[in-house]
Image (cartoon, coloured by chain):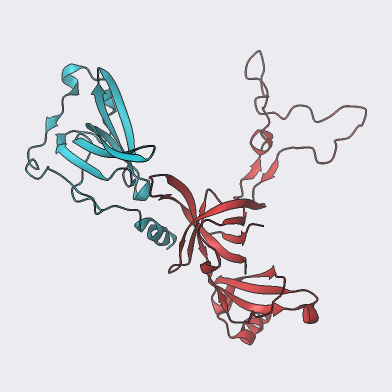
Amino acid sequence: MDTLFGRKLGMTRVFLEDGTAIPVTVIQAGPCPVVQVKTRDHDGYDAVQLGFGETPKRLLNLPAKGHFAKTKIEPRRYLREVRVESADGIEVGSEFRVSVFNVGEKVDVTGVSKGLGFQGVVRRHNFAGGPKTHGQSDRVRAPGSIGSSSYPSRVFKGLRMAGRMGGDSVTLKNLRVVKIDLDNDLICVRGAVPGKAMSFVKIRKSR
Amino acid sequence: MSMNLISKIEAGDLKKRKVEFSPGDTVKVHVKIREGEKERIQIFQGTVLKRRGSGVGATFTVWKVSAGVGVERVFPLHSPNVPKIERIRQGKVHRSKLYYLRNALGKQMRIEEKKSDKAVAVEEETTE
């Protein structure tokens, strides 16, 4: 298994023996129980469904309740599928923990970036805005022209404008694993990771 | 809960120092210097200008006048490169950030000695 699901906890730093301080994001990764195994014969493709995080039973709807009851696994808040080459030897009910990763490895981390709301074009697309001086008024953070006039008489699709920013699924690739705490299911990854603290993230070995 | 887990990661890097020091104190900071293969200890002595931060990220700033020029160095409190901090003298000051020392002249630079803890203020050792 090369993928785990977890929760971003926050950032700190880790000292190497030579005194270098490395900024790291601490992620609580796993334990992820296998809730369902999908095979080519049965489902048309090979995949493993992993769970993560606790949830009270009363929040489950009936289909989810049945799904967990079948496996005798405590209900999980998140269920995600991971495609695998072959699901041979992976059994429902077995668990994957941070031990699937090793210190020094590169991983990709996917999360949902912080929602920043409706942002102007300067913040959202790094536009320069207008001049502050030389008799200008009301155009310091303006987007400028959005196109020609009579031809084409319309605004091109995809033109960068103000709008909702953040809340996108973002993947950061090739982050180094700096530290692993097997007892507490923690993994430290160099640098920042998308999303707010306590948000759901996916960690995958870099390919 | 999440902060508890982060502190578990930090726990390994945190050093336990017996005697604390605060702004206004005069300290000797032992700094590991690497020159190629060789490693030696250099001592930086001066007045603690400020302390900031908590956990592994905490730092302190030491200030001294060297050859008539003010010199400041910021040290990470828990860095492996700072194996030892000695407190030479405890100062009596009225603020936590002594930025006024940078522009102080002559008499203004003086810091009164704290009498009460004078006897204990000798040396401190890290757990290493």
Q: Which chain is cyan?
A: B
| Whole-percent x, y for residue A179 in the image | 46, 58
Q: In this picture, is A48 found above or below B30?
A: below
Q: Whole-percent x and y of residue A75?
A: 57, 78
Which colour is chain A painted?
red
Q: Quadrant of the N terminus of chain A?
A: bottom right
Q: From the image, which quarter does the C terminus of chain A lie in?
A: bottom right
Residue sitting at x 67%, y 17%: A136
Q: Residue furthest right?
A: A151
> Which residue is at 23% across, 50% downward?
B126
Q: Please, is residue A42 above or below residue B56 in the view?
A: below
B112 or A102: nearer the viewer: A102
Tag count: 0
Drawn side of residue A97 relative to residue A3, left or right: left
Q: Position of residue A183 (x, y in %)?
A: 43, 69
Residue at x-position 66% and y-position 84%: A66
| Rendered location of residue A174, percent (x, y) | 61, 51
Q: Is residue A41 above or below residue B92?
A: below
The residue positioned 28% from the left and 22% from the top of the image is B70
Residue A128 lies in what quarter of the image? Answer: top right
Q: Nearer the viewer, residue B47 or A15?
A: A15
Residue furthest to the top in view is A134
Residue B14 is at least partly visible in this image: yes
**Res. A195 in view:** no
Report the front residue among A54 and B18: B18
- The answer to which of B31 and B100 lies nearer the viewer is B31
